[in-house]
Amino acid sequence: MAHKSSAVADEPIDVLFALHPKFNLMDFAGPLEVLTTALHEANDPSSRAFEVTVAAGESTVLSDQGVAIQSQITWKEAHERLSEFDVLVVVGGNVNDAILKAKAEPMPLITAYSEIQKADPTRERTLLSICTGSIFLAELGILSGLSATTHPDYMTQFENLCSHSAVRDLTERTDVIEDARYVVNNLRFDIGDEDENPYVRRKSDAGRRPSNARKGSMSFKGATRRESIARRAAMRLGGLRVITSGGVTAGLDAALYLVSVMVSEESANEVARVMQWTWTKGVVVDGLDV
């Protein structure tokens, strides 16, 4: 696959879903529906914005709800192809001590993805965890110095894991946010002054002005896009955008956010309309990569 520096407008945005045994079905199906519904051009089914690949340990993986999903690639193949993907989605469910202590998949995949970004900060990549999938990130220390959230019922465990990782790795603590549908770190855009930039958000993006962006967070038609690669390289995790969502249906909101910044605000709103879903906005940590 040819190297690309971003999720480009005229190319599908490549997404990898990592499914471990007894994952939560809604954590997978909700964001999957959002991403596969998103179009670059309204009313043009051929302009699908995202291309999805499913990775698992076996050819079929059983969800906690008893539904079997067929995977497309194995963990080994996922590692071999990992640099191809613009987005890695980690779902929740069955986040137990057996997986955490053994650091079983998808934990090595998460680590490898973050290492790829640190080694190659010229490309934009996103790590999205749904519901308790963020516990994997907490245990690995991925969330050090970042803000994050998880399912409310697992907040105490999440906070403890984040604190433990900070002490173990001698790193910064995680700012755990309890009342957010999703939390975004390492937001990177430069399409004008701060007052004109629709993607500089604080605490909530409710009521923000409509975006002038179209088709890809790194490829704006009719706009001059400037980005400091050196600045991104100096950011945590090489500028990897890290998004954590709250419980189950909050994953829909996080996925809609991803559509809004990688495709367009209009596309995200159209997906929400088609799904008859009211998009509840989350928290985006202040940050501009210029």
Image (cartoon, helix red, strand yellow):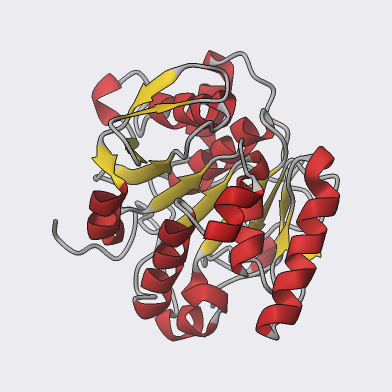
In depth, the one of 150 and 190 nearer the eye is 150
Residue 179 shown left or right of residue 1 in the figure = right
Q: Is residue 122 left or right of residue 145?
A: left
| Picture quadrant where residue 153 is located | top right
Task: Provide residue 61's location: percent of width, then percent of height.
Answer: 40, 29
Q: Residue at x 59, y 66 (%)?
A: 140
The N terminus lies in which quarter of the figure? bottom left
Q: Which residue is drawn at the image coordinates 35% and 41% (left, top)?
A: 57
Q: Is residue 226 visible?
A: no
Q: Is residue 50 above or below residue 239?
A: above
Residue 167 shows up from this direction: yes
For the C terminus, give its image quadrant: bottom right
Residue extending farthest left: 1
How far across and how far down the image is residue 60, in percent? Answer: 33, 27
Number of labels in the image equals: 0
Q: Nearer the viewer, residue 235 or 287?
A: 235
Which residue appears at 29% of the width and 66% of the height? 5
Q: Is residue 149 left or right of residue 227?
A: right
Residue 144: x %, y % from top left: 67, 72
Q: Is residue 217 above or below residue 236?
A: above
